[in-house]
Amino acid sequence: MHRDALRRILAVTFGPERRLAVMVTGIVLAVVAACSLSGCKTSPIGTSGADPSPGRSPAYPATGVLVLYDTTGQYGSLGELYAVQAGNLASHFGAWEAAPVTKYTPGSARRHRLTIYIGSTYDEPLPDAFLADVAAGAPVLWLGGNVWQLIRKCPQIGFQTATLDDASVTEIRYGGAALTRNQAAGALVRITISQGVYSRTLAEAVRPDGTPQPWAVRVGGLTYVAEVPFTYVSFDDRYLAVADMLFDLLAPGTPVRHRALVRIEDVGPHSDPARLREIADYLQSRNVPFAVAVFPVYDDAAGVYSGGVPVHRTLSGSPQVVEALRYMAGHGGTLIMHGYTHGYAGGPNPYGVSAEDYEFYRAHVDAAGAVQLDGPVPGDSAEWALGRLDAARKEWTAAGLTPPDIWEFPHYTASATDYRAIASAPGIRARYEQVLYFNGILGGTGTRSVSQYFPYPVKDAYGTPVIPETLGNVATQRFNQHGLRLAPDLLASAKHQLVVRDNVASFFYHPFLGLQYLPQLIDGMQSMGYTFVAAPSLL
């Protein structure tokens, strides 16, 4: 049985310091617009009832998205990780580039379709040229802190005050949906708009007493969000609101469309062929395309499930499983490659059994029973990772099956080196997973990492198209740090994700569960208006 089934649903996994540095508890700063920057030019701020365009005009040619991020202070390394996440979302709409905001060059925001600024460090020194370009009407999505610098130097922008508000907010209302927010994410920036200035409130935060306050506001070319929405992210999170706002800013004509994916997970030489056929028959009867994540070599070196007798099985030595895979492929299934052994040859990682172990990263179980990631495997390199891919392909071929061109890392975990290696591999055209990102991707320093899921297809910072997985899986037992997650939980998340106008809601399902929960998931998602599609159709 797969012991680590419920994948990380938090986007940030680096300990108690996860609170945004800009949202320091107990600090309340009111900034009143009192002085202007010499030479700070502003575009006219609308005062009529018409909604001004969010910054798109012939003056701002379509040259992709610029992501600007903070780098200073004790938590400066967080800025790079937030920038990667913002850039990944922006990649759905086209090319993007990133740079520290301190290296901003005059006019850059005006030369891009959109600039995303991520204010994660309190009072990061923002260049006057950047503030001037924002005030002049360049299309900007500003996430989080330091907007008080804009107010102080360019009061004509239309914001009057910005206050750090440490109220415990756990709900964000957007697009008719009540999205969740982990209160551990810290304070929000509470803003007020200057009298007579036209603004549009896009989303509201619900305070503990039930009263709303603006969470996302648009004034002219500036769209402002009261926090960096990349911390403590769940499948039902306010993160989805920003993911949808990008359509307004980059593809406003996008029609509403809700697609869904199902992936049968952790299939290997040990799998029950009858269960695989049963699932294929059911899904075909519902006209539901599906994917099958397969690893071709199974190892239980200590005989954990065989009375102490070591077990080693291969696809080529498991003809009934191979025939079941062919059957699945002939009944609407797309086979994808899920590593080589889904385990580590150097010993338990952390359990010593394929499908339960990590393959491309080291892990252990701590004294509290929680799985902790330790770092890359000994000898990790691009050559080593590509060697695993090559070995897997050879075993697929030996079994008489065509090696797939879609890849999924076991347990969604690998080193940055391994991600880049797979991106460079001929014949791999996409990954299908949630993804782990590390400091250094944009040239920064630090030892932090974040996990991210995508509500639509992207081409991520590692350079590979990524097919989304956004809902997790049915987990019927509590294990390690993971709790129960049953079919109604997945369906509730799928309903929240409808707030993204052109989304893909995607889950995976273990075949040892049989048909106990699968019909409920298929029926529930179809009743919401989702259409199940084949994973390759997203590429």
Image (cartoon, rainbow, N blue to C red):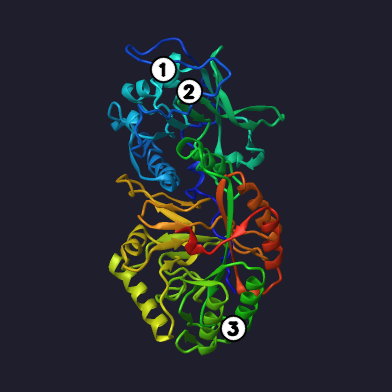
Q: Neighbour class for label 1 at 10 Å: few (<14), some, many (≥20)?
A: some
Amino acid type of the residue that numbered disc 2 sits on in the rendered structure: Gly
- Please give the residue where the numbered disc 2 appears in the rendered image: 220
Question: Which of the two discs, 3 and 2, sits closer to the camera?
Answer: 2
Q: Are marks 2 and 1 in contact (CB under 8 Å)?
A: yes
Q: CA distance from mark 3 to mark 2?
A: 59 Å
Q: Are marks 3 and 1 in contact (CB under 8 Å)?
A: no
Tell me if 273 is positioned left or right of 149 in this view: right
First along the sequence among labels 2 and 1: 1
Q: Is residue 206 left or right of residue 465?
A: right
Q: Residue at x 67, y 38 (%)?
A: 176
Q: Look at the image and tell me in which quarter the C terminus lies.
A: bottom left
Residue 167 on image: x %, y %: 62, 30
Among the two numbered marks 3 and 1 on one chain, the one whose residue lies closer to the N terminus: 1
Give above or below for 411 relative to 23. Answer: below
The residue that label 1 is drawn on is 43
Q: Nearer the viewer, residue 252 or 406?
A: 252
Look at 39% across and 82% down and name the residue there.
397
Q: SS of the residue at dot 3? A: helix
Give percent across and percent down for residue 183. 61, 39
Q: Residue 108: percent from the left, percent from the top?
A: 31, 30
Question: Label 3 amino acid?
Answer: Pro
Q: Secondary structure at mark 2?
A: loop
* Residue that label 3 marks: 273
Q: CA distance from mark 2 to mark 1?
A: 8 Å
| Quarter of the rendering containing residue 407 | bottom left
Q: Name above or below for residue 450 compared with residue 388.
A: above
Q: Report the mark closest to the observer, 3 or 1.
A: 1
Distance in Å between CA atoms under marks 3 and 1: 66 Å
* Residue 73: percent from left, percent from top: 37, 34
